[in-house]
Amino acid sequence: MTKIRIGTRGSKLALAQTRLVEEALHACWPGMETETVVIKTRGDKILDKPLGEIGDKGLFVSEFETALLEKRIDLAVHSAKDLPQRLAQGLEILAVPERADARDVLVQVKDKLPQSPVIGTGSLRRRLYVEKLWPGAQVKLIRGNVETRLAKLADGEYDGIILAKAGLDRLGIIEREKERFHFQPLDPEEFIPAACQGIIAVEGRADWEYREMVEKLSHRKTFLSFETERKVLEVLQADCSQPAAAYSVIEPAGIERERIFLTVMYGGQESRGEWGVEERYALADVLSAQARGNI
């Protein structure tokens, strides 16, 4: 086998996620050689505007898809929540490893927020829930990587910021910075995560000769949640410019049966339900229509 070239963004979090994929590949196939190829995206270059004002989720993906199609890389590692609704022709998601903690986290310097806190986020979904849970809060734009955002919090530009727990865990920040910051995970029933938050997606060419090898890295339940939550985004036609969320959990229900519990939010309206896992797409259709129809 030739060396596998893996494309990634250059942030510490992106590199940490790529290392997880590399380690999984090496664990399955000892001696495999991999190369990390850092690619800068449009989304990495524009840091002074909310994502919804810049464009769709292709901001963090299109350069990787070009590199894949031109065979400059063999795989691309993405945060699944950054994927656009449609991938470029000839490309597929080959694997999704097991999902990390999908919750959002309120990060503060102090244990308690002031009465009218300044809370940083660049997400319309997070803005909506911040304003709902902390009436009187001033929501202020924050962009940049995790370390940049924490530095701004420490400098007093914000009273709190919202970050994804999966990213904090993958970087080891909660344990390392527990004396400096207060980390409060937010209940996903009250602060619904973004669709596919906490999931890593490995993209590659549909006709790549080693695709079946990479497919073995997938975690079955995570892949089912990935498919279901992306189906919600498809039905809602949601992107970075719209406040939307989807979160699913798959649980056993009797002998050889599983049920999927799905929550959908669109424009502040929420809808919840549970069906058999084999009916997950139909459930996504129904709940998405309910959430959208209530606006």
Image: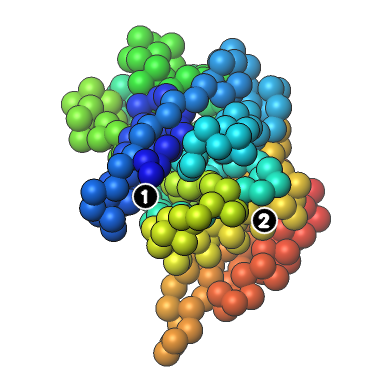
* Rendered location of residue 109, percent (x, y): 31, 22
* Rendered location of residue 156, percent (x, y): 38, 11
Dot 1 alpha-carbon crowd within 10 angstroms: few under 14, some 14 to 19, many 20 or more: few
Q: Name the residue nearer the viewer: 133 or 146.
A: 146
Q: Residue at x 67, y 63 (%)?
A: 284
Inspect this view and state whether residue 191 appears.
no
Q: Label for residue 1?
A: 1
Residue 77 relative to residue 167: left or right: right
Q: Residue at x 40, y 14 (%)?
A: 152
Relative to 30, residue 2 above or below: above
* Rendered location of residue 275, percent (x, y): 60, 76
The residue labelled by disc 2 is 232
Quarter of the image where one finds residue 110: top left
Quarter of the image where one finds residue 232: bottom right
Amino acid type of the residue tagged 2 in the rendering: Val
Residue 218 relative to residue 42: left or right: left
Q: Residue at x 59, y 60 (%)?
A: 227
Q: Name the residue nearer the viewer: 78 or 287.
A: 78
Q: Label for residue 197?
A: none
Q: Name the residue nearer the viewer: 35 or 98.
A: 35
In what element is the residue under mark 1? loop
Relative to 48, residue 164 above or below: below
Dot 2 alpha-carbon crowd within 10 angstroms: few under 14, some 14 to 19, many 20 or more: many
Amino acid type of the residue tagged 1 in the rendering: Met
Q: Name the residue nearer the viewer: 183 or 132.
A: 183
Q: How many marks?
A: 2
Q: Residue at x 62, y 70 (%)?
A: 280
Inspect this view and state whether residue 55 appears.
yes
* First in sequence: mark 2 vs mark 1: 1
Relative to 59, residue 196 above or below: below
